Image (cartoon, helix red, strand yellow):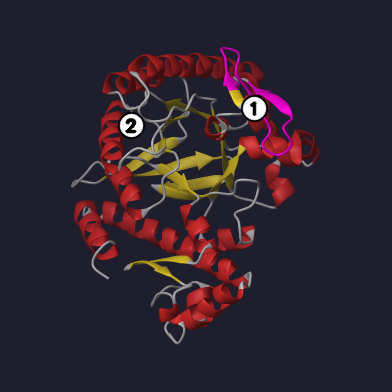
Amino acid sequence: MSIFVQTHQDTTSGARLGLLTLGHGTVETPVFMPVGTAGTVKGIFHREVEAIGYSLILGNTYHLYLRPGLEVLDQFGGLHTFSGWGGNLLTDSGGFQVFSLSNLRKIEEQGVAFQSHIDGSRHLFTPESVVDTQRVIGSDIAMVLDVCTPPQIDFRKAKEAMELTHRWAQRALSHRSALGDAFAGKLFGIVQGNFYEELRSASAAYFNEMDFDGIAIGGLSVGETKEQFSHFLAHTAAQVTRTKPRYVMGIGSPDYILEAVENGIDMFDCVLATRMARNGGLFTRDGVITMKKAIHRYDKAPIEEGCSCLACTTYSRAYLHHLFKSGEMLGPMLATLHNLTYFYTFMQEVRSSIAENRFASFKRQYLERFYGPR
């Protein structure tokens, strides 16, 4: 039974609305997922994340595997109980984190051998063990282990990595089937192929024929140019089946999100909103403002007029500026609350524009204002 149903197709673009049915409730798509790498969205209580309206967040298999570890999570019956999060949880496979540890890992047919960035201890991720790890975490959506490759590698290496991803995906799917009801989550495959159209098409065709609950488009936002991102996103999305939820991993700026939505992508995540908040970067309809700048010292205005978050309804830009200049932790906390409210409201407006068949004009007007002259 499919976990996804498309409820509306925009007449001005490839954007669409849908409903994603998961173990901890139904999610409206397209949806932005805050990142809670180690079992927490940094700088904000889970109840506040839920109060904003989010019902799906992301955790990271690699980090949770290392800390607190599977023994702890198993004792608590999974991350939901351990962390007090009552909504849905998607976990990535750890493949990107292992890819980032280029000097500490070795990729082989069996899996990925790597050293912990914490204490140097040695570990092995296999397609099967990554499924088992996400079962212990209690992931509502689990990702398969894949081989993430950097831009500018040659065709032969890209093809080898893609084919290994395919073999690992089949092993993960077989293991999920063998677990039966013991694995309660949904499993997504990940299209790879680097920056070669032929490989992207082949990988999409491969995953379209497999019995995954959803399909992610991987290997984007890994250091390529904006032009490369746009081209290979559009090319790959055109090849991936629209009968399942489609997910682009690791994107979170308004231009990238709108590009993904335009191509019929349903899900995306990024640390950008919370990371920028911790460093004083606050999102508004008129672009990002930096709270540490002296221009805000006497500013009595809220971060953004009309925003419903506590930071905007209670405090001034001058107060936020003071908090950041003083190194007070309340500054990043309020900024995080604001940025997550901004992205939730942004996605509500995106969905409304699709429902009213005006996404193309919404995208153009939003970007003109957000990236326009200051």
For label 2, the SS is: loop
Please state if 338 lies on the left or on the right of 9 as rendered.
right
Reading the chain from its start, which is encountered first: label 1 or label 2?
A: 1
Magenta part of the protein: which range?
106-125
Residue 360, magenta (yes or no): no
Percent x, y of residue 97? 56, 35
Question: Horizontal placement of 6 versus 60: left or right?
Answer: left
In 3D space, how far apart are the residues under numbered discs 1 and 2 (Cα atoms)? 25 Å
Number of callouts: 2
Residue visible at 29% across and 32% down in the picture: 232
Question: Hey, which quadrant is residue 193 in on the image?
Answer: top left
User: Percent from the top left, x then y, of residue 155?
Assistant: 34, 17
Residue at 28% from the left image edge and 36% from the top image edge: 228
Kindly tell me whether residue 28 is visible in this rendering: yes
Which residue is labeled 1 in the image? Answer: 183
- Seen in the picture, residue 334 relative to 206 is either above or below; the reply is below
Amino acid type shown at disc 2: Arg
